[in-house]
Image: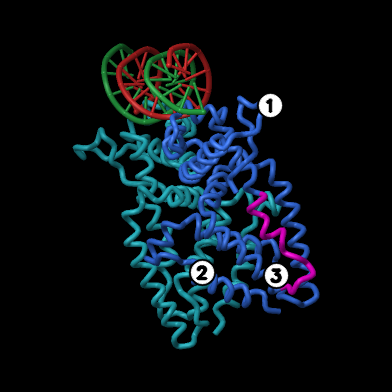
Chain colours: A cyan, B blue, C red, D green
Amino acid sequence: MASGNFCAKDNLNMSKPPTRIQKKNRSAILSAGLDVFSQFGFRGATLDQIAEAAGLSKPNLLYYFPSKEEIHQQLLSGLLHTWLDPLRTMKADGDPIQEILAYARRKLDLSRDYPRESRLFANEVLQGAPRLGESFPDLKSLVDEKAAVIQGWAKVGKIAEIDPHHLIFLIWAQTQHYADFDVQVRAVLECDDPYPQAATFMEHMLRRTLAP
Amino acid sequence: MASGNFCAKDNLNMSKPPTRIQKKNRSAILSAGLDVFSQFGFRGATLDQIAEAAGLSKPNLLYYFPSKEEIHQQLLSGLLHTWLDPLRTMKADGDPIQEILAYARRKLDLSRDYPRESRLFANEVLQGAPRLGESFPDLKSLVDEKAAVIQGWAKVGKIAEIDPHHLIFLIWAQTQHYADFDVQVRAVLECDDPYPQAATFMEHMLRRTLAP
DNA sequence: GTCTATATCCCGATAGAC
DNA sequence: GTCTATCGGGATATAGAC
């Protein structure tokens, strides 16, 4: 995650592959950008912050990426795909309850393991998704497809008759909450790792909600 | 909501009450600030945007508020209190399921009626709550108090034995999702008003989750 | 590849006329 | 109370030495 394709301006002619140091610096910049963009949003982030977090000077940073916009775009581009992967993995021919539980569990693991990515996404959507809006049709078609699968399970009595879209929203909301509102969760719980309890609670909630 | 106390610099001597035009301009600024801060976060917002949205010149805006920080602080100050009001209203001596359902319903109404406030809060927490962190102890004590009430209901078998803190997080996450991720919800549903369906779904989910 | 220096623009805030 | 004009600082990005 967060390691996009190499396409720096000095390499437009595609003459050379990236060296080890180039790879290292580019990934350091992307990681630093993820830190800063996910906390402050696009406009609130500054190249000085990103450069300092990456351990580079600002001009040197702009040697690897042509602009602030490009760093942000690079981070976003792979994000939606990764974010939807757990949903894509949900299969119509599995056991319905187990499939949905496994999906929710994968999504919660994503929040635990990639909280910065979750917050980057949250920031983007909060701002009206100006740089992600074009990807929403793809999002909708996948969600509609999986919602149809869930509705099919409901029709044949495998699970309760619930609105599949709002079930998906529920899983998104609950799992992402632990990454996006991390400071609030920790302030309330005074707990190092809320995820084990969160997983147990979510499983209870989903089993009850889905039972035929 | 969003109408704080009058305290402009020209009135430090407390000699005069605010005139009608002062009230009108101050509330226009706060509303415009809510629009802009909730979308871009503190650092991403600019006074030019706020001034234009309020229909004032920038110096004129700064006649009413001494600084950008002050506008933001004014907006935040009343927010946490309002945001926790639905939880505060939950009473230990009511019917447990009805009390929790009513709480969740009030919280969902808040998302529907005050989406900008929800996004302002989300932005603040996403950024690590730098201007709200001092209020977190109050938040924790209220949540702990109500969590104890819920746990009491569970102990005597009125509701299922669930983790009360994570139940509260679930209600926060699900209700706020519809305000904070509004553009995504609308992109997926292609629907003018998702709230009626959301309320129905949430009631189903909570009744199932809470049933003893 | 990396640096110093700088161009250019925008932001928050102020001065002062009216 | 509201405006035009502007200051000082900080932002993105570039130039050019090494």
Disc 3 from disc 2: Cα separation? 18 Å
Residue B41 in sight: no
Q: Position of residue A80 (x, y in %)?
A: 39, 56
Q: Is residue B90 magenta?
A: yes
**Which chain does the numbered disc 2 sit on?**
B
Residue bearing mark 1? B15
Residue bearing mark 3? B99
- How crowded pointer 2 is (Cα within 10 Å; few <14, some 14-19, many 20+) is rated as many
Q: Position of residue B50 (x, y in %)?
A: 46, 37
Disc 1 from disc 2: Cα separation? 50 Å
Residue B177 in sight: yes
The part of the chain drawn in magenta is B81-96
Q: Is residue B94 magenta?
A: yes
Disc 2 residue type?
Ala
Residue at position x 53%, y 27% from top?
Answer: B63
Residue bearing mark 2? B198
Q: Nearer the viewer, residue A45 or B69?
A: B69
Helix, strand or loop at label 1? It is loop
Disc 3 residue type?
Glu
